[in-house]
Each structure stands twice: as C-alpha cells, then as structure tokens.
Image (spheres, rainbow, N blue to C red):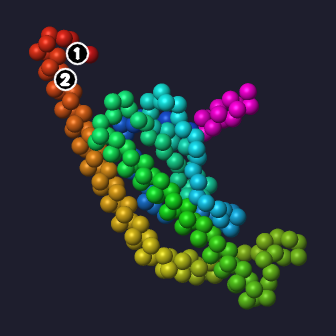
Amino acid sequence: MAARTAAAARRSTWRSFCPSSLRLSAGSSRLCSSKQATQKDRPVNRSTYRPEPSSTHDWVGPPNSLSNIRPIIYHIPENETELEKRLRNLRQDTEDWNHNFWAKQNITFSKEKEAFIISQLKAKGLTLRDQDGRRRSLNSEEMATFYKSFLDKNRVRHANYNKEWYRRNFTITLLLARVTLNSMWRTVTERQSSKKDGTPTS
C-alpha cells in the first residue's frame, strides 16, 4: 500500500505533453540561489521515475534542485522508425547534457560565492554569523565584484556551451523536419494504396 501511494505521489509531480510539439533545450543562464550551496556536492542524479509503458505522451517532471531544469521523458511510439529513434535519442541526450552542465555550473557558482563572502567578511574582521546567530551578508556592490569575476572566469566555458547548444538544436530541428516529411509521405502513399485496393481509409 505504501509503495502504491509513493508511486502515485511521484506521478502527481509529472505532467504529460503531446509528443508532436517541438521542444528545444533551454539555453538561458540557470544560476542557482545561495540556498543550494555547498551541501549539494554529490553526484548529479536525475529522477529514476519512468511513465507507464502505455503512455502516449512526453512526460515533464518538476525542476531539478541542482540544475533548475525540468526533466523530460520522451514517448516511444509503436513502430518507431530508425529516424524517429535517432531524433528521440538525440533529444533525450541533449536534455541530459543540458542538465549535467547547469547542475555542475550551479554547484561551482554556489561554492565560489560562499567562499567569496567568507573571505570578504574575514577581511573585515567579521565571522559568517553575528552575535545573535544571524548570517551576515555583503552589499550589492561587493557582490557585483564576485558576479563579474565569475562570469569573466567562465566566459569561454559559457561560449562553448552556447556553441554546442546551437549545434545540437539545429540537428534536432533538421531531424524533426525529416521525420515530419517522412510521416506525411507515408500517410499519402498509404491512402493512395488503399484507394487502389478499394479499402476505405480512416
């Protein structure tokens, strides 16, 4: 009973989407908040939940706590062609690649941000917390120094990410166009064949 309840709870956090819609990986910055800081230093894992085999839609889960990206499980259609399989695998691989990049980048960002705050407070002769146990913070001008430094240090890394993101999504778009055209051609030929045979089409 407990296992059934847990499975239902997992399903309730996932949402299904029509597989025919084009979904590209998000390429915008996904830096996490300081609340996700250093305790997140563990292997980057994704949910092991998978939709029922009878599912007819793509499934989109809740945002990952490290990457802030929603995981997607792509629907596997019956009689999947090799081209459709190639497209699905590339889309899934791109989602996983995108997740891994931002999860690791956010962990690095949080660690370096924490270290910067501690070093700046130490330079002022202050501890991380005041006498009442409240966490001290830096002002916006002080933090702007860190943000600029982090972006400058990771400029090449982000540029390489953007290049790979565009390359992957350009390939996905081309594959999707080929799959769509093949599907249209298959429909046309099947209708023509059924007319010759005198079999009504749906």
Residue visible at 61% across and 60% down in the picture: 43
Q: How many numbered tags mark residues here?
A: 2
Eye-nearest disc, 2 or 1: 2
Q: Where is residue 110 in the image (x, y as percent from the top left)?
A: 63, 69
Which residue is more in the foreground, 15 or 92?
92
What kind of secondary structure does the magenta stretch mostly adopt?
helix
Which residue is the site of mark 2? Answer: 190
Position of 84 with respect to 44 (left or right) is left
Q: Which quadrant, please, contains the C terminus?
A: top left
Give the secondary structure at mark 1: loop
In the rendered structure, which segment of residues is drawn in magenta? 1-13
Amino acid tagged 2: Glu
Q: Residue at x 37, y 50 (%)?
A: 90
**Amino acid type shown at disc 1:** Thr
Badge number at residue 201:
1
Q: Quick check: is 4 in the magenta stretch? A: yes
Instruction: Give how far apart the Cα atoms at labels 2 and 1 are.
Output: 9 Å
- In this rendered view, identify the residue nearer to me: 82 or 7: 82
89 in relation to 148, above or below: above
In which image quadrant can residue 142 be found? Answer: bottom right
Q: Which mark is residue 68?
A: none
Q: Where is residue 201 in the image (x, y as percent from the top left)?
A: 22, 15
Q: Where is residue 107 in the image (x, y as percent from the top left)?
A: 60, 66
